[in-house]
Amino acid sequence: MTRLDLIIFGATGFTGSRAVLEMIRLSKKYPALTWGIAGRSEKKLEELKQEATQKSGEDQTNLKTFIADVSDEKSLRSMCEQATVVVNCCGPYRLYGEPVVKAAIESKTHYVDVSGEPEFMELMQLNYNEQAEDAGVYVISACGFDSIPCDLGVIHLMKNFEGVLNSVESYIMMRVAPEHAAEAARSGVLHYGTWESLVHSLANSHKLKPLREQLYPSRLPSCKPKLCRRWYHRRGGASCLPFLGADESVVHRTQRHLHAAGARPAQLRAYLALPSALHAALLTLGALLLYVLAQWSVTRRLLLDHPRLFSGGMATRRGPAENVMLNTKFEVELVGSGWAAATDADVTEPDKKLVVKVSGSNPGYGATVTALLVSALTILNEQHKMPKSGGVLTTGAAFKDTSIIDVLHENGLKFDIVSDKKD
């Protein structure tokens, strides 16, 4: 049986349907590429093909479809056995991801997703890394806005630093164009699936420490000077708070992988840059309330049943309007600190900085699906440049020697060096 190059699973969902449209665009650059879509409802898959035909202006009605459901192991195996790479858009991954990972490994099929859920990703590495290596397949999560800009941004820093990179501070900035602010207030800026993942992540955050003790029984060597977390600081007119997403978790796993191969690990602290101290204060209070409410099943149900109310209007069941998504811009600035090539790192303080900026538009549902599909295409086209053993890997560990950054840059995720100077 000849396998398709890739199958998009969860194709009829909010993220999956956008992945389908992006795949139509990208496939024009790869005319020999074969791909299909999968989901649990044949009716919705047929409707999606009609919608994709209308939006793309090209006939998509012959696109191959597969019926698969996370509650039906046989259907997942059947789907995976017909693909070289499965692109999983069915989240929250802590609820629905593991059966797809398991089926992919058993079918010797590579797997990518856009999970930003550290517990899911680290649990998959703990439980399935050896099986994935034995099968010779790659299981790669966080292939979207969580956490390609940060993880591959650090890789880009390491490759261009021309010295010894000791630490990185990343700053995430997002803004909706002012003329679309009112529409954003009406439609929200997050889809319910993203909100659901966040609530469950907060509810299960207590599981991370014991999980990490199992995954990594020994610590990384202490790098000096140590990069300490700053709980609140100002930078370039912005008010900065620790970013509680998956970036630090993912980058730490990448650096673990590189250290095992003999490299000096880089430290990372991730921050969210906000317009003012008032925004920072309101976000802090909202995050604390959200964390507390997520701890009990009764209040957690309230969060899940009333996303708009408890997110301050940011999350809605229908998700942001198309104009809002298209006019949301992001920048991730990664400030690297270390030593120039001619400097003795053992006896001097860091004397060099390098700043990389990763930028683009529609971070949650545009740049994310582009990065996800480029990740899948990189496995198809550049497997010979990836770790030979396979395994459950981060994007940085899997793709560091490939051309993925160049391909992303050509497709709207810009990786630019914006500053190179000595202190």
Image (cartoon, helix red, strand yellow):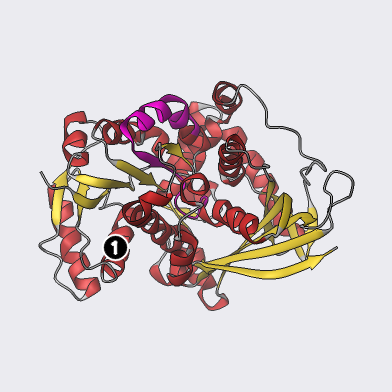
Question: Which residue is at the far bottom?
Answer: 179
Query: For the point 36% across and 32% down, which residue is it?
Result: 132
Query: For the point 58% across and 41% down, which residue is it?
Result: 258
Amino acid on which the number 1 mark rests in the picture = Met
Q: Vertical placement of 14 versus 113: above or below? A: below
**Would you say 74 lies left or right of 394 here?**
left
Q: Position of residue 392 (x, y in %)?
A: 43, 36
Report if residue 219 lies within the magenta region.
Answer: no
* Residue holding disc 1: 23
**Would you say 185 lies left or right of 124 here?**
right
Q: Quadrant of the N terminus?
A: top left
Q: Position of residue 5 (x, y in %)?
A: 23, 53
Label 1: few (<14), some (14–19) or many (≥20) C-alpha neighbours in 10 Å: some
Report if residue 141 lies within the magenta region.
Answer: yes
Query: For the point 61% across and 41% down, which residue is it?
Result: 255
How many numbered marks have been drawn onto this rendered protein structure? 1
Task: State the residue in front, 279 or 64.
Answer: 64
Task: State the residue in front, 358 or 283.
Answer: 358
Q: Quadrant of the C terminus?
A: bottom right
Is any atom of residue 363 visible in this view? yes
Question: Which residue is at the far front?
Answer: 342
Bounds of the magenta segment: 122-147
Q: Position of residue 239 (x, y in %)?
A: 75, 59
Residue 95 sits in which quadrant?
top left
Secondary structure of residue under mark 1: helix
